[in-house]
């Protein structure tokens, strides 16, 4: 089945450590995105990529980094510079011209 | 300034009745609106969308209405079922803006009681 796979589903990190969240899609979508969701809030865009080897900052990119070396993969690194990293992270993809996003199941990151 | 607002954090309805979820927006450049449904610990799934050239779009039990002059849209679910209990997000995007750059509301938690 086509879809988006995020891993790990749950992740614990000590302060000062970088962590990388994986996102893989087999939908052949050009565009991929990373969102963050905090309790009681909507989704906020961290980074997005419309094509391989290219990506742009979203609304809350500070403390995060991404890469897009393959069409299928868009990993997100939460660096130690991110001051409040505990959150639910969602990866999504879309075809270039259609409206809807297809989301993964999310990764919950907790900083201890 | 929040450009997409869902003013009701929660809504509770009886099974079989109508659920109406509301969304207001402030940016007149928005021309495409989407609703997503999200269960706990899962990613959102696309539910229904509407373009600004329409005022209504229907898909089975789900209908979205758009009032451009009031900058208001609503999602109607008829009849409501317990499986509809979830968080519903309204999202809006503008001309030539790709899907991922939609602006999301904070969500409304719908509870459908048996």
Image (tube, helix red, strand yellow):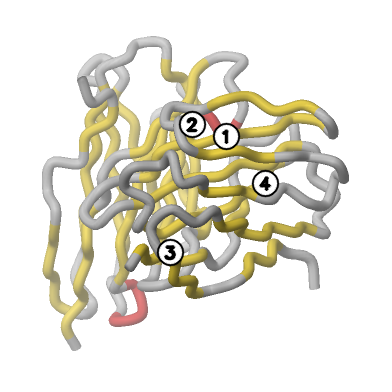
Question: Could you tell which of marks 2 and 1 lies nearer the N-terminus?
Answer: 1
Q: Secondary structure at mark 2?
A: loop
Residue occupying the far front of the picture: A16
Image position of B71 with respect to A109: above or below: above
Q: Looking at the rendered structure, which numbered label has been put on residue A93?
A: 4
Mark 2 Cα within 10 Å, few/some/many (few <14, many 20+)?
A: some
Distance between mark 1 and mark 3 Cα atoms: 17 Å
Q: Give x and y (percent) for residue B3.
A: 27, 23
Residue at x-position 58% and y-position 20%: B97
Q: Quadrant of residue B99?
A: top right
Q: Nearer the viewer, mark 1 or mark 4?
A: 1
Mark 3 or 4: the one toward you: 3
Choose the circle earlier in sequence order: 1 or 4.
1
Q: Front-most of B79 and B31?
A: B31
Q: Are marks 2 and 1 in contact (CB under 8 Å)?
A: yes
Q: Which residue is mark 1?
A: A47
- Disc 2 marks which residue? A61
Task: State the residue in front, B68 or A73.
Answer: A73
Q: Which mark is residue A109?
A: 3
Upstream in sequence: badge 4 or badge 2: 2
């Amino acid at each position: 089945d086509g879809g988006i796979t995020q891993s790990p589903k749950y992740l614990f990190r000590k302060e000062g450590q970088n962590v990388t969240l994986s996102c893989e899609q087999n939908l052949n979508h050009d565009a991929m995105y990373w969102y963050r969701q905090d309790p009681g809030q909507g989704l906020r865009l961290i980074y997005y990529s419309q094509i391989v080897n290219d990506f742009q900052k979203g609304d809350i990119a500070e403390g995060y980094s991404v890469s897009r070396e393959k069409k299928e993969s868009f990993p997100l690194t939460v660096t130690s510079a991110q001051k409040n990293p505990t959150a639910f992270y969602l990866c999504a993809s879309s075809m270039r011209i259609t409206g809807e996003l297809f989301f993964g199941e999310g990764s919950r990151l907790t900083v201890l | 300034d929040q450009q997409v607002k869902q003013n009701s954090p929660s809504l509770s309805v009886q099974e079989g009745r109508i659920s109406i979820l509301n969304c207001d927006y402030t940016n007149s450049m928005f021309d495409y609106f989407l609703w997503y449904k999200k269960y706990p610990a899962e990613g959102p799934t696309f539910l229904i969308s509407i373009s600004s050239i329409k005022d209504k779009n229907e898909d089975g039990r789900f209908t979205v209405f758009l009032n451009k002059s009031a900058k208001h849209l609503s999602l109607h679910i008829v009849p409501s079922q317990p499986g509809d209990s979830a968080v519903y997000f309204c999202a809006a995007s503008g001309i030539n803006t790709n899907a991922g750059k939609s602006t999301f509301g904070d969500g409304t938690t719908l509870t459908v009681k048996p």
